[in-house]
Image: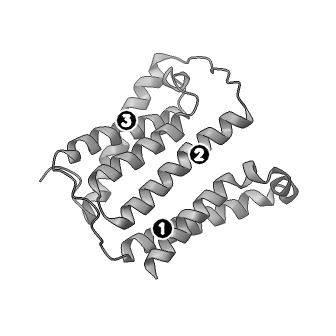
Amino acid sequence: MSFFILILGVALWWGGHLFKRIAPDARARMGKGGKGIVAAVLGVSILLMIFGYRGTEFIPVWFPPAWTVHLNNLMMLIAIFLLGAGSSKGRARTWFRHPMLIGFTIWTVAHLLVNGDLAAIVLFGGLGLWSLTSIFVINRATPEWHRPPAGAVGGDVRLVVITLVVFAVIAGIHSIFVWPFPG
């Protein structure tokens, strides 16, 4: 049952995020109230993914080598940086068209590197496929991209500091459940 809950959570995540791209007329008819509905669907999807993942039996598919923990942590720093770059005021936001989705994709790959069980493959693989699909759908709908103007270097310095703080907070919270550093 937990495995089904996990899959349902991933499916709702996909649906909630892609709804306005797949059914723009239906989303437009919902008006401003639609934002709340979509947010609620996404909130439920996160809860379903958490409870489904935590409740699913561990079924090993592959056994990650110990060195992947180092690569995971490096990739997590990059992912957090890119997630923040999408909202930063510095120059980093001009590097990529979809910094947040690229950061999200890196986050999923990093977690696939260190988790070889079936539930992790469904969770992180499903979310990674969603982020790549989102990039494709956005690029197809709006092929032209106008690079935003570069901001001040101070915005990038602030982004680096925030990245390090967020990484430390995530690692601290993560260590309650699974130690995220080499053993």
- Counting residues from the start of the chain, the first of labels 3 and 2 encountered is 3
Give the camera-side residue of 123 and 43: 123
Name, please, the residue furthest toward the front.
61
Identity of the residue furthest to the bottom in this view: 1
SS at mark 2? Answer: helix
Find residue 157 and report its image quarter: top left
Residue 2: horizontal and vertical position, in percent?
44, 78
| Residue at image coords 30%, 71% | 59
Q: Secondary structure at mark 3?
A: helix
Q: Element type at marker 1?
A: helix
Residue 78 got which mark?
Answer: 3
> x, y percentage for residue 153?
46, 17
Tag 1 near tag 2, CB within 8 Å: no
Q: Is residue 118 above or below residue 170?
A: below
**Mark 1 to mark 2 CA distance (whole Å):** 19 Å
Residue 47 in view here: no
Residue identifier under label 2: 133
Of pointers 3 and 1, the one earlier in the residue sequence: 1
Disc number lying in front (3 or 2): 2
Q: Quadrant of the C terminus?
A: bottom left
Q: Earlier in the sequence, mark 1 or mark 2?
A: 1
- 87 above or below 25? above
